[in-house]
Amino acid sequence: MKRVVFNQKGGVGKSTITCNLAAIAAARGARTLVVDLDPQSNSTRYLLGAAADALEDTVTEFFDQMLNFKFRQKATEDFVHATPFANLFVLPADAALEELQAKLESRYKIYKLKEALDALDFDEIWIDTPPALHFYTRSALIAADTCLIPFDCDEFARRALYTLLDNVAEIRADHNQKLEVEGIIVNQFQSRASLPQQVVQELREEKLPVLEPFLSASVKIKESHQQAKPMIHLDPRHKLTDEFNRLFNTLHAARQPVKQKKRA
Ligand SMILES: Nc1ncnc2c1ncn2[C@@H]1O[C@H](COP(=O)(O)OP(=O)(O)OP(=O)(O)O)[C@@H](O)[C@H]1O
Ligand SMILES: [Mg+2]
């Protein structure tokens, strides 16, 4: 199962949601990989902490290998790093990823990520993407089975959702027929303010797939980033941890095969 967390808008919670849901999958026993495709490397830092500063064999080298083809290629597994959390691994990013992009695009390497991830042995793969639709994001949408869209209840973001869904539909038509929009994740929801409620209501009226529960805004998430501990490890009883857990359940329940009713 490969999921991409995608929104061209910056700061909507892509990295936070990717790492927290992946951490829950891993804590429940699934062998889980986070793929960080953002040169900002926020997910890498969130999962590895200070160790993220001195990394070799990042996703940059993984892509670079495709441009400078050598007789002795490293295997994709060689770019996978263990995190301090059981069952949770990361294919980390670094800033140098930015520079490679144009070259990769001009040399038609857009299917390489999919090929590499398909050959790995993980129960769940979660891909974090940068806030743009370019080579890395397209590679991720081509590699993934489903797409999750974090949404921050902003009116401009609501309008931008249609362009985003059109982009996903185009990738589906051209490159990845099985790509499915799994749903919109409402993040930083303020239940007491009326505007967010109204924006979410509009999404529902427009028949967009809004997932539940919504994720509350909480300052605890800053501490979680700073300590490099996903919420389930930092504070298992926190309200936001509970919301992440229930959101994870929603995603899983939707994928269970419907049991046939027994005949009376
Ligand atoms: N539920 C939340 N409550 C409070 N703050 C949050 C929440 N989710 C995310 N944030 C904050 O919002 C900011 C952006 O989050 P994050 O980095 O996950 O977004 P992103 O979409 O990955 O950003 P980018 O587009 O730059 O990659 C961070 O400072 C994070 O702490
Ligand atoms: Mg991010």
Image: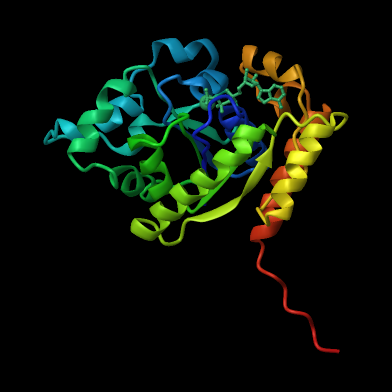
Left or right? Give the position of 36 relative to 67: right
Q: Quadrant of residue 231?
A: top right
Left or right? Give the position of 243 relative to 208: right
Q: Give residue 197's position: percent from left, percent from top.
A: 80, 38
- Nearest to the observer: residue 17 or residue 115: 17
In the rendered image of this protein, does residue 235 appear above or below residue 243? above
- Nearest to the observer: residue 7 or residue 235: 7
In the rendered image of this protein, does residue 216 appear above or below residue 173? above
Q: Give residue 59's position: percent from left, percent from top.
A: 35, 28
Q: Quadrant of residue 259?
A: bottom right
Q: Residue at x 68, y 58 (%)?
A: 254
Question: Is there any visible trace of residue 73 in the rendered image?
Answer: no
Q: Residue at x 67, y 31 (%)?
A: 154
Q: Residue at x 73, y 47 (%)?
A: 202
| Quadrant of image for the C terminus | bottom right
Q: Give residue 96's position: percent from left, percent from top.
A: 31, 18
Q: Give residue 112's position: percent from left, percent from top.
A: 28, 44
Q: Quadrant of residue 87?
A: top right
